[in-house]
Amino acid sequence: MKRTTIFAAGAAVLLAGCDTQKSACCGACCCKEGQTVKLITLDPGHFHAALVQKRMYPDVSPLVHVYAPGGSDLKLHMDRINGFNTRPDNPTRWQTDVYTGPDFFEKMLADKAGNVVVLAGNNSRKTEYILKSVQAGYNVLSDKPMAITPKDYELLKQAFDVAKQKGVLLYDIMTERYEITTQLQRELSQFPKVYGTQEKGTPDDPAVTKESVHHFCKLVAGKPLQRPAWYYDTRQQGEAIVDVTTHLTDLVQWEVFPGVTLSPADIAMLKARVWTTPITLEQYKTSTSTDQWPAYLKPDLDKNGVLQCRANGEFTYSIKGVCAKISVLWNFQPPAGGGDTHYSLMRGTRASLIIEQGEAEGYKPVLYVEPRRGTGVKAEEIDAALKEAMVEINKKWPGVSYEKWETGFRINVPAQYAVGHESHFGQVTEKYLGFLKNHDMPSWEVPNMLTKYYTTMEAYKKSR
């Protein structure tokens, strides 16, 4: 085991022994107004851990303590942090104190070297990490998903109870709330003259649909993404039906029921299924730099030696009587010029709000407003309603406009609002830090997080 401090300049200094000066306190007591937030990164195995540090934050110490078992996951994480520190434009100034060893988690719990634990990595132990961290008095900012099995969900409920008792803040990183077309979709649904009221839909024709297409091999921070070898093991990463669906389920709650406190009693799971994505050994090597199948993946190989990864999932459910459908698909590689895509439908009694991100949109999300056919609503009426709505929307997002389109209207968004997925991690972190400082997290956030994970766990069980 060893502890290494890596400074922004890139030099590494091995500290004598394993003991360093400990903070006088941990938990919420260190996050009051005027006090410094000290980040701890625990077992980083996903690039989202590094994206939290893509920018600097006021009142956050530049020294981050990392506790990990060592190995390739840690190296990839440190390479990304170093890349942020050495980039020519607006470089960061992070310093990293790294502790490696088989007792890294126990060491982190005991050291009290910071007050906010950042979690993004192998999901098989994540819920345990969350529970024990809040029990030790740490605040936790966790990547999704915070639970990948029903057993994990029971631990997560316990963790939220402990966090309340300890006065610490447990929160997950919901980046998609910060995507501009999603924000505008939510906003426009609140204008009755545009949207009308929310349709209920049916199980065969849901009134809300969210579909996300992802890719194992893609670019992140301008470089080819190297996945951990275990990433293709859904027993460690989690199946898609409980992973990326976390974001989509959150958006259904956040957009259709803004500011409403939800509970598991509001959810009825109707149907769910999972299916596989075939991955060849050559593709696996390209994505992970690992040239042979690890033992834990061999049970998932078919007779031709191709991995059948349980990477796809979908479910239909009712939330307060509104039927919604969630779908997540994983392909190995995007088409030329493409990337991950998002489709979103919200159907009101006057208009449908639809986000498309296909080839026609240049693989960039675009929001359309389509008058409902067969309802007697005229396009001219929606046009006038949009003109009225834009007056209010421009107070928050100056420059947003609309134009007539083939199927209705297209919302035009100035480029400065389309900051991209990677920048959303900084926006979420900034929001979380504000909650820590001001103690003003909305009362609906925790119950809605629990309801969200209840929903994905019900889908997991239904898919069986």
Image (cartoon, rainbow, N blue to C red):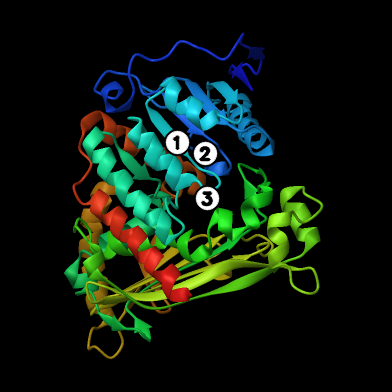
Whether residue 399 is visible, yes or no, is: no
Please tell me whether mark 2 sits on a helix, a strand or a loop.
helix
**Residue under numbered circle 3:** 124
Tell which circle, 1 or 2, labels the residue nearer the N-terminal end.
2
Is 446 placed left or right of 45 in the picture?
left
Residue at 33% x, 65% y: name it: 252
What is the C-alpha distance between the residues marked 1 and 2? Answer: 7 Å
**Residue under numbered circle 2:** 49
* Picture disc at residue 15: none
When the figure is inspected, residue 75 is found, relative to residue 324, above or below; the finding is above
**Residue under numbered circle 1:** 118
Whether residue 128 is visible, yes or no, is: yes
Please tell me whether mark 1 sits on a helix, a strand or a loop.
strand
- In this view, the residue in front, 169 or 293, is 293
What is the C-alpha distance between the residues marked 1 and 3? Answer: 16 Å
- In this view, the residue in front, 38 or 303, is 303
Of the residues shown, which amino acid type is indicated by label 2?
Ala
Quarter containing the N terminus: top right
- In this view, the residue in front, 432 or 132, is 132
Residue at 56% x, 29% y: name it: 103
Of the residues shown, which amino acid type is indicated by label 3?
Ser
